[in-house]
Image (cartoon, helix red, strand yellow):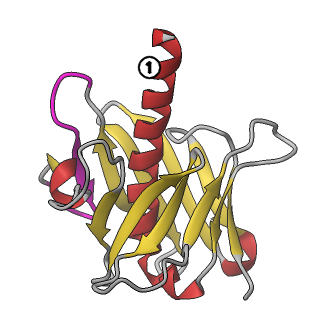
């Protein structure tokens, strides 16, 4: 099976471009006064379209907006921890714009995306993040299953929130040590 790489222009999850030129995929991520905004280049209308926005707070609930929504809502309403998960689990579920439920899970210090199966079947990763610290070897999100490309807007927004939280937790643990 062929994989697709969505390459990050920088190692930041607040100011970067995520792209795959051969497929015409381009997401611009930038920090604004209202939080982090994610835009996708839409060739059909020849402009950037907002696909999401989020604010991660230190002392209150994180907030987000998807697509053209004008109302902020709690991140945990969309990117949620299932009732049957362990209290220490960092895995989060979400329902993408294609109606499918997915799960981000940390494996070996990196985020991996799975489809939520209603039965105990095989757990094949659909996408995984590879973080690099050198400019000549950029970070990338590797898509293992091309069927998820239709849900890429939701996957990118959820990934950026999860990775920002993961990095914040990593920094807090390092500071406490």
- Quadrant where the N terminus sits is bottom right
Residue 145: x and y in percent read 59, 83
Q: Position of residue 173 (x, y in %)?
A: 47, 21
Judge by depth and name the residue closer to the eye, 55 or 4: 4
Q: Main secondary structure of the magenta part?
A: loop
Q: Which residues are magenta?
A: 58-70
Residue at (32, 74) in percent of width and height: 96
Describe residue 96's horizontal placement relative to residue 24 as left or right.
left
Residue identifier under label 1: 172
Q: Which residue is at 52% across, 88% downward?
A: 147
- The residue drawn where x is 18% and y is 62% is 84
**Location of residue 154 by image quarter:** bottom left
Residue 29 lies left or right of residue 21; in this view the side is left
What residue is shown at x 48% (from left), y 45% (from top)?
163
Q: Where is residue 73 shown, x and y percent of the image?
A: 13, 50
Q: Residue furthest right?
A: 136
Element on which disc 1 rests: helix
Q: Position of residue 75 (x, y in %)?
A: 22, 49
Quarter occupied by residue 132: top right
Determine crowd level at label 1: few under 14, some 14-19, many 20+ residues with C-alpha closer than 10 A. few
Q: Is 131 left or right of 150, judged from the image as shown? A: right
160 in relation to 148, above or below:
above
Within the magenta stretch, is there residue 4?
A: no
65 within the magenta span: yes
Asked if 12 appears above or below 137 in the picture, the reply is above
Q: Nearer the viewer, residue 122 or 115?
A: 122
């Amino acid at each position: 099976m062929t994989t697709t790489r969505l390459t990050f222009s920088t190692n930041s999850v607040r100011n970067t471009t995520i792209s795959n030129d051969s497929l015409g995929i381009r997401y611009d991520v930038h920090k604004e006064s209202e939080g982090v905004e994610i835009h996708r280049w839409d060739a059909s209308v020849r402009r950037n379209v907002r696909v999401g926005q989020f604010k991660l707070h230190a002392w209150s609930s994180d907030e987000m907006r998807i697509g053209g929504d004008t109302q902020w809502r709690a991140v945990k309403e969309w990117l949620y921890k299932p009732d049957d998960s362990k209290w220490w689990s960092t895995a989060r579920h979400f329902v993408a714009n294609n109606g499918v439920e997915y799960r981000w899970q940390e494996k070996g210090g990196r985020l991996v995306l799975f489809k939520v199966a209603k039965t105990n079947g095989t757990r094949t990763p659909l996408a995984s993040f590879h973080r690099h610290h050198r400019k000549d070897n950029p970070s990338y999100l590797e898509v293992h299953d091309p069927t998820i490309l239709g849900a890429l807007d939701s996957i990118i927004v959820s990934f950026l929130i999860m990775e920002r939280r993961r990095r914040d937790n990593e920094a807090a643990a390092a500071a406490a040590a």
